[in-house]
Amino acid sequence: MAQCECLEKCIFFHDKMGNMPSMAEIMKKKYCLGDSNNCARHIVFKAKGKGSVPADLFPNQLDRAEKLIHG
């Protein structure tokens, strides 16, 4: 599996999911160690840059990612 290039510095997993390690690992396997093109955070990162990714954006919030990209 390919690792997402953002994983090492992803504040969502390193800061926001610290108190939920089991859930974080499940999400990492699905979004960070699989196809990162399905990750809302990665989608916003690719479209708008690192500074446009909200800290509280969950990887599964694709609708919110679309709104962030397209207004």
Image (spheres, rainbow, N blue to C red):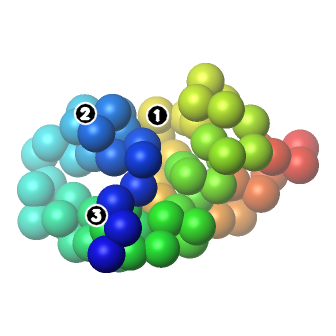
Residue contact between numbered discs 3 and 2, judged by CB atoms under 8 Å: no
Of residue 26 and residue 47, the one placed in the foreground of this image is 47
Q: Earlier in the sequence, mark 1 or mark 3?
A: 3
Read off the residue under disc 3: 28
Quadrant in which residue 31 is drawn: bottom left
Is 23 placed left or right of 54 in the picture?
Answer: left
User: Which is more N-terminal, label 2 or label 3?
Assistant: 2
Residue kind at label 3, given as amino acid type: Lys
Rendered image quadrant of residue 13: top left
Residue depth check, mark 3 versus mark 2: number of the one nearer the observer: 3
Residue 44 visible in rendering: yes
Q: Residues within 10 Å of mark 2 (few under 14, many from 20)?
A: few
Answer whether labels 1 and 2 touch (C-beta < 8 Å): yes
Residue in the image at 56% along x and 71% along y: 38
**Mark 2 is on which residue type?**
Asp
> At 58% across and 30% down in the image, what residue appears?
50
Mark 3 to mark 2: distance in Å? 14 Å
The residue to which callout 2 is attached is: 15
Q: Residues within 10 Å of mark 3 (few under 14, many from 20)?
A: some
Please determine whether, in this image, residue 25 is positioned above or below residue 58.
below
> Which element type, helix, strand or loop, lies under badge 1?
loop
Question: Residue 49 in the image: x percent, y percent?
Answer: 67, 32
Could you give the CA–CA distance between mark 1 and mark 3, rounded to whole angstroms? 16 Å
Labelled disc at residue 66: none
Residue matched to label 1? 55
Image height check: is 47 above or below 40?
above
